[in-house]
Image: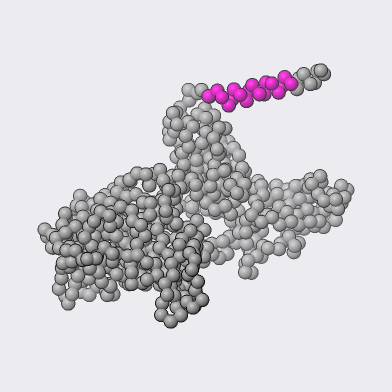
């Protein structure tokens, strides 16, 4: 055996032993882990979702300069951000200049006449061995460079080979749903975003520096993109701590220029987030923190327990204000979605129809019309029968009016705002005077422009063990003796009056007025147009998760009617209020309502424009809470 072979075998054996030691022998360290990690949880994953406004990244110099160059590219009609000279040699600079004037290379860079956001990613000497015979023959004697351009809107890559000596483009190939390696400039931007992310600094227990980052240009493949949407370009700058055997992966979305998520993971022995979607990180975080346990919120005198349900959206329970009990439970249990169409004579109902995972219901109407649609349930992202799932965690935000705060949860179909996909917001508003409001927000887009949406709201007050419900009739309060319902015919307070009130049995001067929405909240609402129901409390009538209620398309059936048959006495009883608004969507230009559309924005990227419809009643204390 030759001396060289013996050396090679020795190196191989040593290498195998080293790998075995690394893989099977645990690392020992006396160094203390970062504040957010315990030494015992080294092999466990921890997910961190951003809690800060994306706008904090816009003033980072690297991001700010890049956006400035993008605006110039949009203005010149190409939408292509060129590579900087510092990334290119003189031949690559010439190749880029040739391509940015080539009509075939620029093909597919506009949509509806508007330039789309694209980046030149890499321009390097072409690898001759991978070329076809014709191109190879030219490039064996000429300087040839290969260039890549990425379209952020269509998530596609265009590759070209340029004969720099003859200033000629030899080939152009388009690759849909494919992402190239990122440019050096985007790598630096990703590093800057990770370094400026408050969540990253908090998890590391210090303000990190650039020297702490590795693999800032590492991304998942298209199929395993580490972001919310697989059409986003993402990378995962990493902060490794070899002493604890863990690393913090900061997943940066370069399409939106923001931190998408972060994740602690073991070094070397566990799956990295480059192969885990942002949505899956969110789902696991939401399930652990908001579906499998309650959260208590105390703010401005309010105390609220809340959690996410399997199919009844965000539920608040055991609500009190300044120590006074207010509500046992409040939630939106369903959204009925119905569409009116013509052509009932051609309707084939012999087979079941399923759209986006929903069973479609058909109801024949007058003449040749019919209604079709389904009931939407909102719920936890895993182990739930819901189709419209919790997106990110519940948020606590100040009210726009400045006199309180809101607890809100976003629910959406993964493909929203595409057709037949929906986005709903469950919101509870809490005011400093002890008022509160149950709010449903529909953000479109749905399956058509003739939709009728009906959110089913369930409010279980807790003013006393026994309560009474009243409606204002001819200026006098009339108590409801039995379960019943009516359409809310009220378009605003007259002389400070309200149409309904609920009081404790022990004191009819206490309790809450009920103020329907008629557009008085400055949110462009067109009013509730609601039905209101009052039923006797039964645990199996919504105290736990409900199956979908009623019919999506029989407009005289909100689903609550079944709880009123036969009508039971509700006088001096534990009662439940059901409130069901009725909303018509609108897609007319300048009149949009309950609608969403995707358009090319000022920066050449797709922007979702939303025209929400906001509904729901406000509960106003009859007596001021001291």
* Residue 84 pos. (x, y %): 68, 51
The reply to whether residue 55 is visible in this rendering is yes
Tell me, yes or no, whether the highlighted magenta stretch contains residue 562: no
The reply to whether residue 624 is visible in this rendering is no
At a point 22% along the width and 57% down the height, the residue shown is: 537
Q: Is residue 245 left or right of residue 80?
A: left
- Could you tell me how many numbered marks the image carries? 0
* Residue 57 pos. (x, y %): 51, 50
The magenta-colored residue range is 9-27
* Residue 55 pos. (x, y %): 49, 54
Tell me, yes or no, whether the highlighted magenta stretch contains residue 18: yes
At a point 39% along the width and 44% down the height, the residue shown is: 289
* Residue 94 pos. (x, y %): 78, 54
Q: Nearer the viewer, residue 475 or 415?
A: 415
At a point 46% along the width and 47% down the height, the residue shown is: 282
Q: Is residue 278 left or right of residue 408?
A: right
Q: Nearer the viewer, residue 474 or 141?
A: 474
The quadrant holding residue 581 is bottom left
**Vertical placement of residue 253 versus 348, above or below:** above
**Vertical placement of residue 401 versus 307, above or below:** below
* Quarter of the picture holding the N terminus: top right
Q: Predominant secondary structure in magenta?
A: helix
* Quarter of the picture holding the C terminus: bottom left
**Vertical placement of residue 363 versus 211, above or below:** below
Identify the residue at the far bottom of this view.
Answer: 367
């Amino acid at each position: 055996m030759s001396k060289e072979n013996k050396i090679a075998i020795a190196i191989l054996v040593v290498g195998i032993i080293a790998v075995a030691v690394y893989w099977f022998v645990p690392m020992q360290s006396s160094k203390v882990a970062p504040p957010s990690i315990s030494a015992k949880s080294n092999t466990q994953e921890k997910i961190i979702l951003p809690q800060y406004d994306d706008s904090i990244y816009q003033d980072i110099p690297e991001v700010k300069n890049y956006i400035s160059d993008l605006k110039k590219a949009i203005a010149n009609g190409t939408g292509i951000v060129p590579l900087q000279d510092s990334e290119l040699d003189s031949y690559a600079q010439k190749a880029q200049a040739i391509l940015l004037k080539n009509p075939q290379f620029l093909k597919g860079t506009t949509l509806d006449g508007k330039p789309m956001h694209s980046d030149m990613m890499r321009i390097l000497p072409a690898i001759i061995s991978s070329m076809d015979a014709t191109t190879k023959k030219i490039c064996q004697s000429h300087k040839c460079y290969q260039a890549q351009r990425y379209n952020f809107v269509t998530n596609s890559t265009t590759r070209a080979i340029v004969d720099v000596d003859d200033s000629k483009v030899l080939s152009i190939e388009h690759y849909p749903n494919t992402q190239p390696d990122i440019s050096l400039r985007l790598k630096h931007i990703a590093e800057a975003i990770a370094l400026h992310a408050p969540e990253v600094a908090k998890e590391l227990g210090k303000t990190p520096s650039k020297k702490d980052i590795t693999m800032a240009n590492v991304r998942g493949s298209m199929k395993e993109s580490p972001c919310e949407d697989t059409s986003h370009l993402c990378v995962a700058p990493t902060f490794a701590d070899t002493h604890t055997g863990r690393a913090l992966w900061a997943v940066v979305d370069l399409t939106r220029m923001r931190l998408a998520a972060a994740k602690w993971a073991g070094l070397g022995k566990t799956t990295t987030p480059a192969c885990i979607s942002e949505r899956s990180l969110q789902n696991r975080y939401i399930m652990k923190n908001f579906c499998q346990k309650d959260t208590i919120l105390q703010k401005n005198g309010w105390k609220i327990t809340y959690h996410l349900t399997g199919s009844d959206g965000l539920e608040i329970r055991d609500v009190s204000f300044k120590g006074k009990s207010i509500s046992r439970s409040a939630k939106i249990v369903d959204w009925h979605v119905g569409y009116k169409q013509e052509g009932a004579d051609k309707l084939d109902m012999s087979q079941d129809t399923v759209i986006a995972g929903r069973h479609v219901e058909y109801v024949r109407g007058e003449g040749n019309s019919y209604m079709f649609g389904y009931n939407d349930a909102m719920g936890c992202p895993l182990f739930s029968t819901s189709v419209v799932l919790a997106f990110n965690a519940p948020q606590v935000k100040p009210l726009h009016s400045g006199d309180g705060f809101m607890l809100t949860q976003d629910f959406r179909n993964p493909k929203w705002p595409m057709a037949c996909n929906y986005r709903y917001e469950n919101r509870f508003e809490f005011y400093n005077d002890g008022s509160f409001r149950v709010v449903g927000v529909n953000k479109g887009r749905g399956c058509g422009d003739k939709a009728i949406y009906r959110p089913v709201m369930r409010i279980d007050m807790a003013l006393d063990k026994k309560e009474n419900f009243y409606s204002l009739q001819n200026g006098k309060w009339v108590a409801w003796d039995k379960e019943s319902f009516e359409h809310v015919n009220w378009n605003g307070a007259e002389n400070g009056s309200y149409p309904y009130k609920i009081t404790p049995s022990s004191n009819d001067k206490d309790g809450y007025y009920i103020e329907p929405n008629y557009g008085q909240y400055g949110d462009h609402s067109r009013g509730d147009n609601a039905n209101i129901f009052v039923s006797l409390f039964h645990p199996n009538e919504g105290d736990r998760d409900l199956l979908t209620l009623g019919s999506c398309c029989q407009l005289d059936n909100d689903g609550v009617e079944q709880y009123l048959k036969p009508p039971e006495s509700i006088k001096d009883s534990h009662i439940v209020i059901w409130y069901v608004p009725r909303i018509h969507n609108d897609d007319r230009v300048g009149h949009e309502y309950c609608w969403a559309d995707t358009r090319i924005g000022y920066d050449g990227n797709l922007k979702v424009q939303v025209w929400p419809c906001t509904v729901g009643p406000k509960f106003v204390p009859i007596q001021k809470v001291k």
